[in-house]
Structures are given as C-alpha cells and as structure tokens.
Image (tube, rainbow, N blue to C red):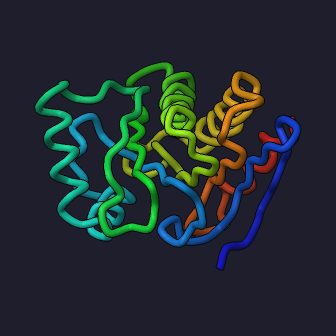
Amino acid sequence: MSVTIASVEPAPGRAFVVEVGDLLAAEVDAIVNAANGHLAHGGGVARVISRAAGADLDEEGRALVAARGPVPTGEAVVTTAGRLPFKGVIHAVGPSQGQGDEEAKLVSALRAAFERAHERGWTSVAFPAVSSGIFAVPLAVCARAYARAAREFFAARPDGPVRTLRLVLLERGDLGDLVARALEE
C-alpha cells in the first residue's frame, strides 16, 4: 500500500505523483531502475530489481552492453522485466555527485526513461529516487530534477500515451518534502 505525498497535473489528463511505497508493487506498465552504464546491478534499488526480476533481466542487460557499449549518463534503455509483473524495466543512468552538471544530467536520464515508455505506448511508469542513494547527488538537486523532468516530458508529449509518472520513495523523509515543494514552484 502506498501513501501519496504530492500529486500534480502538469498537463490535462496527466499526473505526476510522489508516494511512499514499494516500487516493485506499483501498478504501472513499467518501472525505472537507477542503473549504472554497465547495467551491473550490484547495489541499491538496482540490486533489488535484479534479484526480483531474475536472470533474464541481467542477461539481456549484459547482451545490450556487449553490443552497444556502456549506456551513457543521461540516457536510458529497456530490458525485459523477467519475473516482475511489468511490461519492461527502463534502466536510467543518472549522474554521480562530482561529475558536474548533475541536475541537467539527471533530468536527461529521467526524460530518456519517460521517452522509452512513450516509444512503447506504455501509459504509466514508476521510478525510484535515481542518483540520490549510492550516487550521492544532493537531495535538493534530485528533487528539482524529478519535478523538472516530469514537467518537461509532459509539456513535450501532452497527447502521448504516458499519462502517469510515479516517484516511489521508500520513506517520507526529506526528499519527499523537497519534491513536494519543487512541485509547488
């Protein structure tokens, strides 16, 4: 069961929802993984998703990286969801603190993830707090980037298939409050 912290309608019939809950239990077409460029799911939310999805997700990710090279920061790719109940997992490569221009790179990664959902005709996407954990991007920067990415995506795709974006946090904490404030600006 999730608890809504904030919800806005950035465009008619479109919703950006911030909630506390379980990403893997979200009732959406696809989830976003907070990935690294090699799609090596060794820690954080990536590890949780990988374990729940099973070997197919990891195998497809390795094949993708072998064929195309590492996924650049600010980009996103799709793999199977394996055993998870989603149509796919979108792997967004957000920045690590210290790379420079972290906010713009994080907006780019999330916009790319939302575009992958748009390309597939998916209507709903849930994403975790990309770059805020082991990548250590400051929470205020993340909050602004999450709100900006959702607004920019819906402004660019007002009639697209994606109708709902859900930021799913593990706990309320400071990040939830910062995102709620960023949505009011």
Q: Residue at x 22, y 44 (%)?
A: 61
Q: Residue 114's spot in the image, x, y percent? A: 56, 36
Name the image quarter holding residue 13: top right
Asked if residue 135 lies left or right of residue 154, the reply is left
Point out residue 87 in the picture as x, y percentages from the top left corner. Answer: 45, 55
At 70% across and 49% down in the image, what residue appears? 164
Task: Give residue 10's position: percent from left, percent from top.
Answer: 83, 37
Residue 101 position in % (x across, y down):
50, 20
Q: Which residue is nearer to you in this view: 164 or 169? A: 164
Residue 45 lies, with reference to residue 66, above or below; the image says below
Tell me what residue is drawn at x 71 percent, y 22 percent.
Answer: 156
Q: Residue 33 vs residue 102: left or right?
A: left
Vertical placement of 100 versus 2: above or below? above
Name, please, the residue furthest toward the front.
121
Q: Residue at x 76, y 30 (%)?
A: 159
Question: Which quarter shows the C terminus?
Answer: top right
Image quadrant in which the N terminus is located: bottom right
Task: Give the side of residue 69 with respect to residue 36, left or right.
Answer: left
Residue closer to the observer: 18 or 14: 14
